[in-house]
Image (cartoon, rainbow, N blue to C red):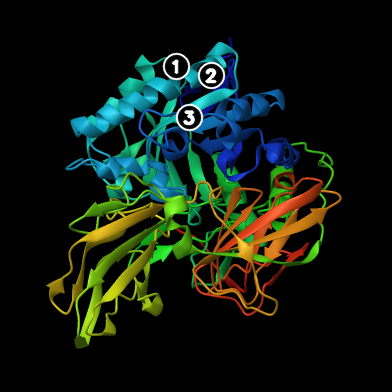
């Protein structure tokens, strides 16, 4: 049994002082075939520890159904890190933020009337406890006290940025201990009075998160924790991107300089992120500061390793700083992962969405539009359908409190788009016999941070013509977790893709390798490769390519499906070896 502990102002391992040089790598943002590559590169940089969150919504996608296989195989990831000689910090708190959908909370919580999140609400705690009854016993054999690599476990994540319920924090702490967690516990918060007051817990190590102003941040931590190891649990050495913004980058020399300040202060450090990875599928989150801001598919984060796992100038700048404090020698990096250009791929088949509804969904009829969660759905799209009477002229259609983006059709003809961040009404004219009204709503990612966390999706209030609400709705849930029922027809020669529709292509691969999908001329949608949801694309950027890891390809024929919402200039797309995350804007994250 190995003992990791806290003695006065230092961490110890079997009685010897241990400073943690840690980096965040999220197993759930990387295909499992590349876990070892990323971990080896972390170790080659001189780091001795890896940190990961644990997203509840990945592991319990439906209440009572638990998933710990494939990209969700947390135990395999931890064991692998241990075999490579790395310590592991695990952050299994119910909420993780992480720019991840709903901050890791499962969407089905929002179907419970009256439930209060992240507090000592008995109903919420009962859901957390049921999850922990499944999760925590999987972690106990992986603790260093059981011979495993896990040395630290988080109680809650940046709770002081959200609440002040000490009974809730104590419930989580006691629940971890009661289920067998016997390594040190910690909390992590921003270095401010309110955050440390709200998020800290007596007897639990407090750590702070920041990107600059090292001395000031640690001084604030010392006001609340006079003794104990100094640790920056999240050193924001890069930043993330939203749609309709520019790509964020942080100067490598500046990031290395601040890292050096922390080492000079005698602190332990966890890089957030060391390797960002990808928000595959519909798992990107969103922010809402002044308005709703959905996060892009790439989670490159401008970290020391790129989204596709390549060491950057920041990687080497950070390593050089660490080498001033440790005898590192030459880095022992794995062989570079090959990237290839497969050339132009042309979609040859088309399936109109409206013609596929009964193949993809079982309709539900209700008087009012229901939210996605009330329909038992977590992600994707919902098609709302009704019939409105006519004639009507000079009226305005309002999709009230849409979350997040609605395409409106009258008798199958596009009538406009209503977006959450620009909720304008649409002028409509309805003929004497009335018209079919279809509203296709996309969940673009639940808010993952702040006071607006309870972010139900779909049409959350109602649909009005002027002030008159419309009733009698048929709803088709479209989670798109399987496209097996889609019936395609040949795309006519010279026909440009329209939408909303599925477009399918087949292409040959002789040797699978990493590649990037360019969709120049396409508008907005989702890409699937051999049935795997790669994520969203959007012409508004900044991201211009989608990362396609080589393990998702196989020798021979591969299937690529594009779900396009609006239309494209041509039926072609490109598989290239060059990534493009958009034009960059400099950033220095603070707290």
Q: Residue 337, position in %: x, y?
A: 80, 48
| SS label for mark 3 | loop
Q: Which mark is residue 182?
A: 1
Going from N to C along the chain, the mark reached first, 1 or 3, is 3
- Asked if the residues shown at circle 1 and circle 2 are in contact, with their CB atoms under 8 angstroms apart, the answer is yes
Does residue 511 appear in this view? yes
Residue shown at 25% from the left, 34% from the top: 124
Query: Is the residue under label 3 in contact with that under label 1 (CB below 8 Å)?
Result: no
Q: Nearer the viewer, mark 1 or mark 3?
A: 1
- Foreground pick, 182 / 473: 473
What is the quadrant of the N terminus in the image? top right
Q: Position of residue 460 (x, y in %)?
A: 24, 59
| Residue topped by disc 3 | 9
Q: Nearer the viewer, mark 3 or mark 2?
A: 2
Vertical order, 30 against 120 (above or below): below
Q: Which residue occupies the foreground of this view, 67 or 265?
A: 67
Give the mark nearer the N terminus: 3 vs 2: 3
Which residue carries the number 2 mark? 143
Label of residue 533 in the image: none
Q: Residue furthest left?
A: 467
Tag 3–tag 2 contact (CB < 8 Å): no
Q: Position of residue 149 (x, y in %)?
A: 60, 22
Residue at 34%, 64% (x, y): give it: 289
Quadrant assignment for the C terminus:
bottom left
Q: Secondary structure at mark 1?
A: loop
């Amino acid at each position: 049994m190995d003992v990791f502990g806290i003695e006065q102002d230092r961490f110890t391992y079997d009685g010897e002082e241990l400073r943690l040089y840690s980096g965040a790598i999220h197993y759930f943002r990387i295909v499992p075939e590349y876990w070892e590559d990323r971990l080896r590169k972390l170790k080659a940089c001189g780091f001795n520890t890896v940190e990961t969150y644990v997203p509840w919504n990945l592991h319990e996608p439906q209440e009572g159904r638990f998933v710990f296989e494939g990209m969700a195989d947390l135990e395999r990831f931890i064991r692998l890190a241990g075999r490579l000689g790395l310590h592991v910090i695990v952050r299994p708190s119910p909420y993780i933020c992480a720019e991840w959908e709903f901050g890791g909370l499962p969407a089905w919580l929002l179907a419970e009337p009256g439930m209060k999140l992240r507090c000592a609400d008995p109903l919420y705690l009962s859901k957390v406890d049921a999850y922990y009854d499944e999760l925590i016993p999987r972690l106990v054999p992986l603790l260093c006290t059981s011979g495993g690599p896990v040395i630290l476990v988080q109680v809650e994540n940046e709770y002081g940025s959200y609440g002040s319920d000490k009974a809730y924090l104590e419930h989580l702490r006691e629940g971890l201990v009661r289920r067998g967690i016997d390594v040190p516990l910690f909390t992590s918060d921003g270095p401010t009075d309110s955050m440390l007051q709200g998020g800290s817990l007596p007897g639990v190590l407090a750590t702070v998160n920041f990107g600059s102003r090292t001395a000031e941040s640690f001084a604030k931590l010392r006001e609340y924790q006079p003794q104990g190891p100094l640790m920056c649990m999240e050193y924001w050495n890069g930043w993330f991107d939203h749609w309709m913004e520019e790509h964020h980058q942080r100067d490598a020399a500046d990031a290395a300089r601040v890292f050096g300040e922390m080492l000079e202060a005698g602190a332990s450090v966890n890089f957030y992120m060391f390797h960002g990875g990808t928000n595959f599928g519909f798992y990107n989150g969103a922010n809402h500061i002044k308005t709703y801001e959905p996060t892009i598919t790439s989670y490159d984060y401008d970290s020391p390793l790129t989204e596709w796992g390549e060491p950057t100038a920041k990687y080497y700048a950070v390593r050089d700083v660490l080498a001033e404090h440790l005898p590192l020698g030459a880095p022992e990096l794995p062989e570079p992962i090959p990237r290839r250009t497969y050339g132009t791929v042309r979609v040859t088949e088309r399936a109109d969405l409206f013609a596929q509804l009964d193949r993809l969904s079982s309709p539900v009829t209700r008087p009012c539009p229901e939210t996605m969660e009330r329909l038992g759905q977590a992600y994707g799209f919902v098609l709302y359908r009704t019939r409105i009477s006519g004639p009507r002229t000079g009226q305005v259609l309002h999709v009230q409190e849409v979350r997040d983006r609605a395409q409106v059709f009258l008798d199958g003809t596009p009538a406009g788009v209503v977006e959450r961040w620009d909720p304008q009404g649409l002028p409509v004219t309805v003929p004497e016999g009335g018209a079919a009204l279809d509203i296709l709503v996309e969940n673009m990612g639940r808010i993952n941070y702040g006071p607006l966390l309870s972010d139900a999706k779909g049409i959350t209030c109602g649909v009005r013509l002027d002030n008159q609400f419309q009733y009698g709705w048929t709803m088709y849930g479209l989670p798109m977790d399987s496209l097996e029922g889609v019936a395609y027809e040949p795309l006519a020669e010279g026909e440009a893709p329209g939408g909303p529709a599925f477009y399918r292509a087949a292409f040959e691969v002789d040797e699978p390798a990493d590649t990037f999908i360019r969709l120049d001329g396409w508008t907005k949608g989702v890409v699937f490769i051999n049935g795997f949801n790669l994520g969203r694309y959007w012409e508004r950027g900044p991201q211009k390519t989608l990362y396609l890891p080589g393990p998702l390809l196989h020798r021979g024929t591969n299937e690529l499906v594009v779900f396009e919402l609006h239309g494209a200039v041509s039926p072609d797309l490109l598989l290239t070896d060059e990534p493009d995350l958009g034009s960059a804007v400099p950033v220095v994250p603070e707290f």
